[in-house]
Amino acid sequence: MNQYGNPDMLAWQAAKYDMLANYYKYLNPQKHVHYYHMHLQCMQQWLMSERSDQMMGMTGSPAKVRVLHASPDAPAVDVYVNGQKVLENVSYKQQSDYLEVPEGQYKIDIYPAGNTNQPVLSQNVGVEGGNMYTVAAAGKLNNLQLIAVMDNNAVSNGKAKVRFWHLSPNAPAVDIAVKGGDVLFRNIPFGKATRYLTLPPTTVDLEVRVAGTNQTALEVPGVSVSPNQIYTAAALGLAGGQPPLEAMFLQP
């Protein structure tokens, strides 16, 4: 018997809770949140159920995946996995919680929130068991793409880890440097994430520079890193446009 439950029943329950969440969206916000979380729980179990038969005889942990809306001109979106809605009304700069899924390939469809006529993006994403991923919907709306990076929640005791992820679609390749000082990460193009850098706990002023120059594209003052914490500094927005270029710090 499937350890995650009957997939048809889970899909039916997920659809039921989704309808209830939508019904109470404006009538009763507390009930909306309650039923939406029930919907997400059923969807997570459904995803596990759909792939559990393929995992029979295999060992290992599930993958953990979260989604970040990083497209500066895209509307709020709904996210579908293998044809089932798993996230609703995700707006720019919003990130989801991690969802546990078995390793494998998943078809991701992204629709404008509340609209299923035509996806703004359809793309397959593969994940490996035991790994953690952040999948960003990035780029401008007319060139939207999913960009996945592998997260790492291991850190030396008393230290911090930091990396940089370039998600500004119109910004050139950049260097990340201490203000007026040394370069920490060099020549990062759009879509790429750097390696993690292990640091002692500190507070520092940083600069995002056009790669290979001293031209500052963005100042990021007063960045504090705490012991035993991991940070991804993501550059979002548009260079010289709206919404403006900014740094957003993601954890774990």
Image (spheres, grey):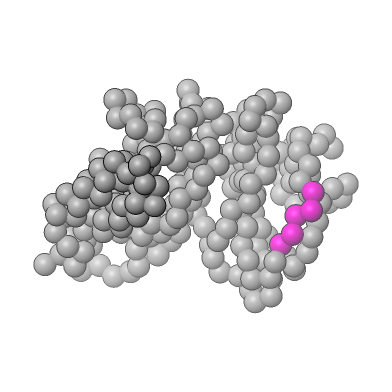
Q: Which residue is drawn at 35% across and 42% down?
A: 27
Asked if the magenta segment contains residue 55, the reply would be no
Q: Does the magenta stretch include residue 222?
A: yes
Q: Left of 222 or right of it: where is 151?
A: left
Vertical comparison of 7 with 1: above or below: above
Q: Specify the principal SS of the magenta part.
A: strand
Considering the image in quadrants, where does the N terminus appear? bottom left
Residue at 34% x, 36% y: name it: 109
Residue 131 appears in the figure:
yes
Q: Is residue 6 left or right of residue 124?
A: left
Farthest residue to the bottom: give it. Answer: 157
Instruction: Residue 209: give x, y in percent of width and height.
Output: 77, 38
Q: Where is residue 134 in the image (x, y as percent from the top left)?
A: 48, 51
Location of the C terminus (image quadrant): bottom right
Q: Residue at x 45, y 50 (%)?
A: 96
> Please, which residue is most extreme toward the top here?
142
- Between residue 237 and residue 193, name the one nearer to us: 237
Image spot of residue 197 (x, y percent): 68, 60
Magenta residues span 221-225
Count of numbered tags: 0
35 displayed left or right of 143: left
Horizontal and vertical percent position of residue 218: 76, 38
